[in-house]
């Protein structure tokens, strides 16, 4: 409810405010993701039995030729990128794990898998649209790290992902 109001009223106002005062859009998007995560963590709910973990394609090493877009479990586990760890986590905990190459694909995956909760890793732009698109589903967003620039060999703090998954699996409240 509070999340919905924030998405419908607060965020558009914030975008206008940001435009007027020339605040960088990614900063406004980062704020949206942060507020969303806080509200989701404050909400009461039962532990989620069906959890979806969505990852961006740019986490895969650029030199890796294995096709993981349609099936991330094709990863051969060489350990050069975090995909290996996520495959192991998904297998150990029975998670739905997918690569989302864009908003349309992400929405289709959500429709197909019907999760009770989502943990998503992406850049500010994709995550901010994702949290709004998937509302009222609870989603915790984790912004990726981009040491080589956008969309190329990106990284993510796996502990943040583990923590978000544990939150939904156990329910903090
Ligand atoms: S861990 Fe998997 S996806 Fe990453 S580089 Fe190795 S084989 Fe490719």
Image: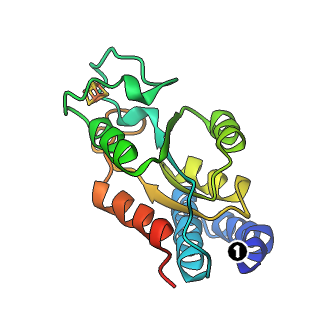
Left or right of 164? Residue 79 is left
Q: Residue 137 at what x, y percent from top left?
A: 68, 61
Q: Residue 57 at what x, y percent from top left?
A: 45, 32
Q: Residue 4 at what x, y percent from top left?
A: 76, 71
Which residue lies most toward the left here?
A: 79
Residue 18 occupies which quadrant of the picture?
A: bottom right
- Residue shown at the point (24%, 29%) measured from the top left: 77
Q: Nearer the viewer, residue 143 or 164?
A: 164
Residue pointed to by mark 1: 3
Compared to residue 113, the image places residue 101 above or below, namely: above
Q: What is the count of numbered marks?
A: 1
Residue 161 occupies which quadrant of the picture?
A: bottom left
- Residue shown at the point (66%, 52%) measured from the top left: 129
Disc 1 element? helix
- Residue shown at the point (68%, 71%) measured from the top left: 14
- Residue shown at the point (70%, 36%) measured from the top left: 108
The quadrant of the rendered image in which ligand 1 is seen is top left
Compared to residue 173, the image places residue 21 above or below, namely: above
Quadrant where the N terminus sits is: bottom right
Left or right of 27? Residue 128 is right
Q: Nearer the viewer, residue 64 or 119?
A: 119
Q: Is mark 1 within 8 Å of ligand 1?
A: no
Left or right of 33? Residue 153 is left
Q: Nearer the viewer, residue 115 or 147?
A: 115
């Amino acid at each position: 409810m509070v999340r919905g109001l924030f998405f419908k009223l607060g965020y558009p106002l914030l975008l206008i405010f940001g435009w007027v005062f020339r605040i960088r859009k990614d900063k406004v998007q980062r704020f949206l993701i942060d507020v969303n995560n806080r509200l989701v963590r404050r909400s009461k709910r039962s532990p989620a039995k069906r959890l979806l973990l969505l990852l961006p394609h740019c986490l895969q090493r650029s030199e890796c030729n294995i096709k993981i877009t349609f099936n991330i479990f094709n990863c051969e586990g060489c350990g050069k990128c975090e995909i290996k760890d996520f495959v192991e986590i998904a297998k150990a905990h029975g998670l739905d794990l997918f690569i989302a190459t864009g908003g349309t694909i992400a929405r289709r995956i959500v429709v197909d898998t019907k999760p009770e909760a989502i943990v998503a890793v992406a850049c500010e732009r994709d995550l901010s649209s994702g949290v709004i698109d998937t509302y009222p589903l609870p989603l915790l967003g984790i912004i990726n790290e981009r040491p080589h620039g956008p969309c190329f060999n990106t990284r993510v703090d796996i502990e943040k992902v583990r923590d978000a998954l544990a939150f939904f699996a156990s329910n903090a409240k």
